[in-house]
């Protein structure tokens, strides 16, 4: 690090090997196949390397081997010139490596930021004044200096993760490892953390090993390593790796969206070379137009929004406000007047930052949070003289009036299924069957065992699992993806008319994400009338939702079709939200005089571009 | 949202009492408790009352918040008072009704004990109201330091307390989330008999335990990776510094004990006429 004094034993040579693996193998106890199988690679000092691979490919095991949290069964690992052998050099090696894990909550030992950052140096026996300096420098490096005396639990996840990075930096490591450190963050938090990592690499020359599921993050590295089943299967510049899309598919990885769009464009006769950044792709589309002598292209307008659908199971929300800990010094207003209509049959998206109020909003829909006037003890207040009575929120879901004390809230919850974030963490029963049957038995007390069995099996089949094979297993013996499916089955088993899912794809690898979205579409067409998803992933919203709303600071910013919503990309970006890749492309193309109007799905975008080219050629 | 509420009953304010060294506050509380138990007279009790009321005033914590702590021991208070009312014998019989005899001495003694308990709770509440759990932990660790010479793992104990404090809000959040999720699946925690309600806790308890173990494992890894050792060479960043305010407060605490003892010894000389109604033990 430039502004920090170098550790005494830091070799200065530029081509110094920071890290090397030689034919390393590792088995988890009681497993047949090795988690890491004969891996060899090396990383130079100051290099920025990204590691990608499907869930279970061994990339996290790799990280744990480097800092000696796991011990290799075969082969040798050399970290900063130190041979990692058994327990001997463990402490030495850990002084040179810092690792940031996935869950920001589970890495902090203290209730005050500076105490947590001090933990590492305290362990090393650094003297007090020096610890103070390190806290200052580390917090400055992650841009969190003003939070030195704050309580971590009150920070956003992105901020917490930056504190975790600071805690690691205070050890003065030479190699920084990020083990899916951004997987649980929203796009804003992700940008914050990645920005810090890039700066450390560029300005301080820190060696970085970034393990990630996000293609955009992997791209930032100088070199990318692809892992599959414990082996390194590809290695090279991100360009080389991601342009070789076919190979990625065979390693259970998804193609980057941009590669997919470029491929589709090529098949429509628009010759775009493989590329990785939206700017490059937009530039090559423009260049293609210019080469054909086409100027000021525009695609046919998309037909206007047909408006929200309606049916027996509409959701109507009027004037919804909600304040947490009302009347206490800690009161915070989460919802500040929400008006929203979600029609029967929609695939609806809710977008917003962590803390925007979207979780509070959806918990009203199945009365986990009740309207004030629906509480048993509620008595309407007489308005003071000369004042209008306060506006009470109204909320109806199908035939249920949630403002009514006498509303049957239990059967409402059977009709409005709610899948929380990371639903697999709520599994509890001894067998999958019992867990899935839990809700069913709560809602329908009089079912015969045969009926229960029939309906549980149907639900398990609906989430794409084989009941005969899985029902008797313990839910804790399943893989991550299977657990999530079982958890979803436990909600849809009551055949809800409306299914609400909070971040259904969170924490999954790209292929897992795609499978879950496919599952939701099949549920939408065969099982439930309306599906509502809460998501940070704009591409996910654009590709799947009929309509979506953006919640920002307790208010609805906009509620429209993806076409109308994402056309306001500049405003969305200024709210700190992301926009779909296709919207980014449209935005750049517009500056080049190519006006693309589309529904912001990749297919829609490609068709619109092709149509614009055809239109231009006809005129020419 | 639970996470927005500071854990414990800490009342955030800027005051002399808040800024005192936590070690001193703990020691003062001990001194105050000793004084309460050493006091044999209403004079001594009154001195303790003066001390605690002054302390509440200085701390800028509303009296209501401090008094609320008494609510928790209301049952104990009434029980103790009644017991002494009926069992304490003396010379001045006030009420005789069947087997019930109430003496004036009994009434005075019951009142004495009640106030002793109330002041005890007020003092302890004031400590937790003006000191964050974190600095309480720091103070305890520092006070227990001498124990390390008899191989008592003071540092490990402090770390355990610190981690426990750190994870209470996180686990409370998690509990709420699990409760909501199971409620959404029709779980009912509010009705039914005791057996039914205990059974209803299982779908909350098991996921919570599993999550706590998972968190513990991840935290262990994160601590290991940050070079955690339990070696004596560990240093400590946070250092508690004793300032002039602390000296003043220590002096006041010493005066309190001295005063109480003096009242015990010279109670007769102050006013011989009421001596027997003032001295309780």
Image (tube, coloured by chain):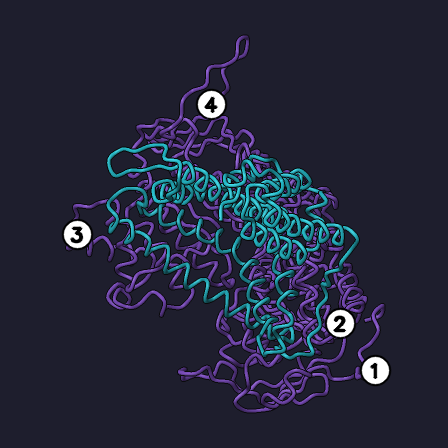
Q: Is residue A65 above or below residue A145?
A: below
Is circle 2 on the same chain as circle 3? yes
Mark 2 Cα-neighbour bin, 10 Å: few <14, some 14–19, many ≥20: many
Q: Is residue A198 left or right of residue A558?
A: right
Q: Secondary structure at mark 2?
A: loop
Q: Say left or right for B117 vs A10.
A: left
Sequence-first tag of 3 and 1:
1
**Which numbered marker is on residue A392?**
4
* Chain appearing in purple on the rendered image: A
**Compared to A243, does A410 lie above or below?**
above
Q: Tell if the residue under mark 4 belongs to the same chain as the one under mark 3.
A: yes
In the rendered image, residues at marks 4 and 2 fall on the same chain: yes
The reply to whether discs 1 and 4 touch (Cβ–Cβ < 8 Å) is: no
Q: Which chain is depicted cyan?
A: B
Q: Position of residue B280 (x, y in %)?
A: 49, 45
Closest to the observer, B118 or A121: B118
Q: Residues within 10 Å of mark 4 (few under 14, many from 20)?
A: some
Question: What residue appears at the point 35 percent right and 26 percent down from the top-left corner?
Answer: A404
Marks 3 and 1: same chain?
yes
Question: Mark 2 sits on what residue?
Answer: A206
| First along the sequence among labels 4 and 3 | 4
Residues tagged 3 and 1 counted as in contact (Cβ below 8 A)? no
What percent of the width, then of the height, locates residue A191? 67, 55
On residue A12, which mark appears?
Answer: 1
Q: Nearer the viewer, mark 4 or mark 2?
A: 4
**Is residue A243 visible to us here?**
no
Residue A466 at x, y percent in the picture: 28, 64
Tag 3 residue = A451
């Amino acid at each position: 690090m430039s502004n920090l004094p170098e550790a005494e034993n830091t070799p200065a040579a530029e081509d110094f090997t920071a890290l090397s693996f030689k034919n390393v193998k590792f088995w988890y106890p009681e497993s047949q196949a090795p988690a890491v199988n004969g891996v060899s690679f090396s990383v130079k000092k100051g290099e920025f390397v990204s590691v990608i691979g499907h869930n279970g490919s061994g990339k996290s095991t790799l990280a744990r081997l480097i800092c000696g949290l796991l011990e290799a069964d075969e082969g040798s690992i050399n970290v900063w010139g130190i041979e990692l052998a058994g327990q001997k050099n463990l402490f030495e090696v850990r002084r040179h490596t810092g690792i940031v894990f996935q869950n920001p909550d589970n890495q902090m030992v203290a209730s005050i930021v500076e105490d947590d950052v001090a933990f590492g140096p305290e362990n090393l026996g650094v003297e007090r004044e020096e610890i103070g300096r390190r806290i200052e420098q580390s917090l400055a490096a992650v841009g969190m200096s003003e939070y030195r005396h704050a309580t971590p639990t009150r920070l956003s996840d992105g901020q917490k993760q930056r504190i975790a990075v600071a805690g690691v930096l205070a050890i003065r490591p030479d190699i920084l490892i990020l083990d899916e450190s951004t997987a649980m963050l929203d796009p804003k938090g992700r940008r914050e953390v990645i920005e810090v990592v890039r700066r450390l690499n560029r300005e301080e020359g820190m060696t970085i090993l970034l393990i990630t599921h996000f293609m955009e993050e992997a791209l930032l590295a100088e070199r990318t390593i692809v892992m599959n089943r414990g082996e390194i299967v590809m290695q090279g510049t991100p360009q080389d790796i991601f342009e070789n899309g076919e190979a990625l598919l065979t390693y259970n990885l998804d193609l980057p969206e941009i590669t997919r769009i470029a491929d589709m464009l090529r098949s429509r006769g628009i010759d775009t070379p493989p590329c990785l950044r939206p700017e490059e792709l937009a530039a090559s589309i423009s260049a293609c137009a210019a080469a054909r002598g086409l100027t000021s292209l525009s695609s046919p307008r998309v037909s206007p929004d047909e408006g929200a659908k309606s049916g027996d199971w509409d959701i109507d929300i009027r004037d919804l406000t909600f304040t947490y800990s009302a009347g206490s010094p800690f009161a915070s207003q989460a919802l500040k007047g929400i008006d929203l209509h979600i029609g029967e049959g929609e695939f609806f998206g809710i977008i917003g930052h962590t803390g925007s109020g979207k979780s509070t909003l959806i918990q009203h829909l199945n009365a986990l949070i009740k309207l004030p006037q629906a509480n048993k003890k509620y008595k309407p207040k007489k308005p003071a003289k000369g004042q209008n009575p306060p506006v009470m929120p109204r909320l109806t879901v199908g035939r249920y009036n949630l403002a009514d004390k006498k509303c049957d809230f239990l059967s409402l919850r059977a009709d409005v299924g709610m899948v929380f974030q990371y639903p697999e963490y709520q599994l509890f029963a001894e067998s999958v069957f019992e867990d899935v049957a839990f809700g069913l038995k709560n809602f329908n007390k009089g079912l015969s065992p045969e009926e229960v069995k029939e309906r549980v099996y149907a639900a398990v089949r609906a989430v794409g699992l084989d009941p005969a094979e899985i029902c008797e297993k313990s839910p804790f013996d399943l893989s991550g993806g299977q657990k999530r499916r079982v958890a979803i089955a436990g909600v849809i088993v009551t055949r809800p008319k409306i299914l609400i899912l909070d971040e259904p794809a969170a924490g999954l690898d790209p292929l897992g994400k795609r499978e879950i979205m496919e599952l939701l579409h099949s549920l939408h067409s065969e099982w439930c009338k309306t599906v509502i998803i809460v998501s940070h992933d704009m591409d996910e919203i654009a590709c799947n939702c009929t309509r979506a709303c953006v919640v920002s600071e307790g208010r609805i910013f906009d509620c429209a079709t993806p076409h109308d919503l994402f056309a306001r990309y500049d405003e969305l970006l200024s709210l700190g939200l992301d926009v779909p890749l296709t919207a980014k492309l449209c935005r750049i193309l517009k500056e080049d005089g190519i006006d693309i109007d589309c529904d912001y799905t990749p297919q829609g975008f490609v068709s619109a571009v092709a149509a614009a080219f055809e239109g231009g050629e006809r005129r020419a | 949202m639970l996470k927005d509420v500071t854990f414990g009953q800490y009342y955030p304010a800027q005051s002399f009492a808040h800024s005192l060294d936590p070690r001193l506050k703990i020691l003062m509380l001990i001194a105050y408790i000793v004084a309460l138990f050493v006091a044999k007279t209403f004079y001594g009790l009154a001195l303790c009352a003066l001390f605690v009321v002054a302390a509440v005033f200085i701390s800028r914590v509303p009296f209501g918040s401090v008094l609320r702590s008494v609510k928790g021991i209301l049952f104990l208070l009434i029980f103790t008072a009644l017991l002494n009312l009926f069992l304490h014998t003396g010379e001045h019989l006030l009420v005789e009704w069947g087997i019930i005899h109430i003496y004036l001495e009994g009434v005075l003694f019951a009142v004495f004990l009640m106030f002793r308990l109330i002041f005890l709770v007020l003092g302890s509440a004031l400590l937790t109201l003006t000191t964050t759990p974190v600095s309480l932990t720091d103070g305890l660790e520092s006070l227990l330091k001498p124990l390390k010479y008899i191989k008592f793992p003071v540092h490990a104990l402090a770390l355990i307390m610190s981690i426990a404090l750190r994870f209470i809000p996180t686990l409370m959040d998690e509990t709420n989330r699990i409760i909501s999720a199971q409620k959404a699946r029709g779980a009912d925690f509010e009705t039914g008999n005791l057996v039914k309600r205990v059974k209803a806790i299982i779908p909350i308890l098991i996921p919570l335990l599993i999550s706590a173990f998972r968190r513990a494992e991840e935290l262990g890894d994160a601590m290991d990776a940050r070079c955690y050792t339990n070696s004596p060479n560990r240093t400590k960043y946070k250092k508690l510094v004793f300032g002039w305010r602390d000296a003043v407060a220590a002096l006041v605490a010493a005066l309190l004990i001295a005063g109480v003892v003096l009242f015990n010894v010279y109670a007769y000389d102050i006013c011989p006429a009421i001596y027997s109604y003032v001295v309780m033990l």
